[in-house]
Amino acid sequence: MKRLAFPMLALAGVLSAQVTFDRILNAPKEPQNWLTYSGAFGSQRHTSLSQIAPANVKNLELQWIYQARSLEKFEATPLVVDGVMYTVQPPNDAMAMDAATGRIFWIYNYSPSPEARPCCGRVNRGLAILGDTLFMGTIDAHLIAIDAKTGRPIWNREVAKAGSGYALTHAPLVVKDKVIVGTAGGEFGIRGFIAAYDVKTGKEVWRFHNIPEPGEPGHETWKNDGWMHGGGSVWVTGSYDAESNLTYWGIGNPGPDWNGDPRPGDNLYTDSVVALDADTGKLKWHYQFSPHDEFDYDSVQIPVLADMQWKGRPRKVMLWANRNGVFYVLDRATGEFLQGKPFVEVNWMNGFDEKGRPMRVAGKVPSRDGTLIFPGNQGGTNWYSPSYSPRTGLFYIPTWGDYSSIYVKNDQEYEEGKNYGGGRPRSPVNLARPPLNTRKDGEGFGAIRAMDPQTGERKWEFKMADVTDAGILTTDSDLLFSGGREGFFYALDARSGNLLWRVALGGPVQSGPISYSVNGRQYISVNGGSSLFVFALRQ
Amino acid sequence: MRVSQAIMLVAAAGLASAQHTFTPNDIEDGGQLFKGTCVGCHGPDGNLVPGIDLAHGKLRHASNDDQMAAIIRAGIPGTAMPPNNFTEFQAETIVAYLHSIGNAAGAATTGDVARGKTIFESKGGCANCHRIRGQGSRRGPDLSDIGAYRRAPELEKSILDPDAEILPQNRSVRLVTKDGATVTGRLLNEDTFNVMVLDASERLKAYAKSDLKEFAFVDKSPMPSSKGKLSAQEVADVVAYLSSLKGVEVK
């Protein structure tokens, strides 16, 4: 009781105080707030709030809606700090709202350069905060510090050239006195990097080359001049482990996407997770999920950190459901490969060697006439946040099941700022279609799959008719919230997958839900279509 | 058949550029790009803009394939032709596709639009399921603007072999409700919990999946083949009629 009372008192004292790094580090201790993209540095997208529970979830009702002045995909995850919600209306309008009522405090309208041409929508996935400063990446590859009280810009740094195809779409990650971002643009022949900037000045402190240059370790995995336009983008937020001071990031596909001929070799560090020293950006370890990828299998997923009993002893692991269709467990201190099991149909590989390198299936490569590959180009999963519940011990994956593409390769010359794909995947799923679904099962369907990390086996599945781009939130009351392209937002029993509650939002859910509380009342927030919805229990 | 077709297409594509040869897949990709970006103004045969016939080299601003590919990418300032974010190769595949349809045409029998309309509405029985400008049934796809999207060889194929390609938006389903009623119709939309159909009586009906005993796709097209029922000339007439349908007239 005493231990509970203390943080409450401490919180009351800092109610309007700044978001110190210590608070972010201890985010799970203040579940009324949502202080980073994934809720905490471990990126479990799990809340210890439990007012909303299986017994009462049917009493959820709408509290407020914010209709964005934009028809672009609304992918941002909000931050919530002491009753104030911060989010980004696409493409790059940062805003502050009352988290209980939705009334707006301020909007910062940023107009990206006309040169910005992100591959897959003029999107933004959210903000980071430290002190009284918010940080936003923009689709024209700028990083902007914004005063959280007024919405006024403090500094604006050009991270990379928008005209060369670079963009920033993910929520930055603040570690200590640095704000860390990575560059998107993997379809435009960029050479991706991750960089840290001083939070006060915006000055670059370190830079990690996702594609090593001559003289750097890993460069030998690029033959010819392929490294110069090798891709290696970053477009979702990394994680951080304070004990090791490592920050973990998933790296995107090599370029050209669907034709590996100009880039013989494994193409490090594309399709890899990298563990970087947060102070220096130096590489501690890496693991490459898809060496020499030709299927656009970006390893742009959230690195989920968990501490669990593993084969009889406590172990600090990283859980990773990859776009390539395999669910991995890695040791996050060393990068050691512990386990990899497909969570969807996979035909490009059929196991691992003793070092954890995937064994390829002969002939399963893009070809002039097309090759059928499972999973297809959007992957078994993609950037949509998974969730890990320390209570159930299960890892929950937004999944595309029974989904394939026919991969066709073409010749392609690099041209600055232009698409550098080298082919085209033919997919039964029309990615830019209207909200009507007449697909058959064999053309891909969406699902939530609950996996046991200990075995890699599936515990249950909640199947949708249409595919999904929605993230997942789990709670200490054993609820799971997610949605899909159909526009439903629903609550499942995290232990059984049973549907407990649902609502039709009228537009696809293309973000991850969050939870927070204001004055002791728990809220659930999610974007559907162009709007942000907030629910709470009927009073 | 596939081989000879492939050789013909590659040969056609060879005209497009000295640097590249194009596989049938490249040309199909070019066709997809053309249909996705260009068809709205140029039409499925590339001849909808007055004075221009892209598939037969009738051009105003280009005198060879390289210039044509350059225009596809850069547009023509001061005209409705916008620039496009295609690679050089992609632009060349579009040109290759246009050559392929230009070469493939010609052989078809010439049809008569007026005769085709009569056959469509009487002997062919087409209007029993299809609707054109407010006339006919809604059970099949509305064809009021089919000529703006489908080329003559594609229309002919659909008439003679309707099962060969059924677009996802034209799929049929068969449902059996818990109280035993059987419903067939066009699937309009499906989600995890509901099915939306246009039933045989042209009613918009929604069913909760929890109220259904059975729900299955009908793999074959409900459309009968006209093979053996219409002569080659009659099919050509219907194709000519359908090709003339470019949408609802605005007055």
Image: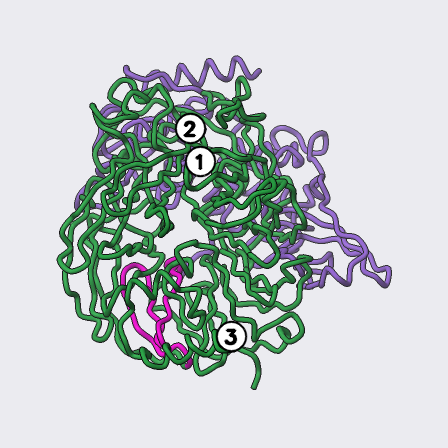
Chain colours: A green, B purple
Distance between the alpha carbons at the discs numbered 3 and 1: 35 Å
Distance between the alpha carbons at the discs numbered 1 and 2: 7 Å
Residue bearing mark 2: A293
Residue at image point 34% right, 45% down: A246
Amino acid at circle 2: Asp
Question: Could you confirm whether marks 3 and 2 are on the same chain?
Answer: yes
Residue at image point 61% right, 33% down: B235
**Left or right: B91 in relation to A502:** left
Give the chain letter at badge 3: A
Q: As rendered, which of A280 and B239 lies closer to the eye?
A: A280
Specify the quadrant of the image occupied by residue A368: top left
Q: Is residue A392 visible?
A: yes
Residue at image point 66% right, 55% down: B137
Give the chain letter at badge 2: A
Of labels 3 and 2, earlier in sequence is: 2
Q: As rendered, which of A514 and B37 lies closer to the eye?
A: A514
Mark 1 near mark 2, Cβ–Cβ under 8 Å?
A: yes
Residue bearing mark 1: A297
- Point out residue B55 in the picture as x, y percentages from the top left corner: 37, 29
- Point out residue A187 in the picture as x, y percentages from the top left corner: 33, 37
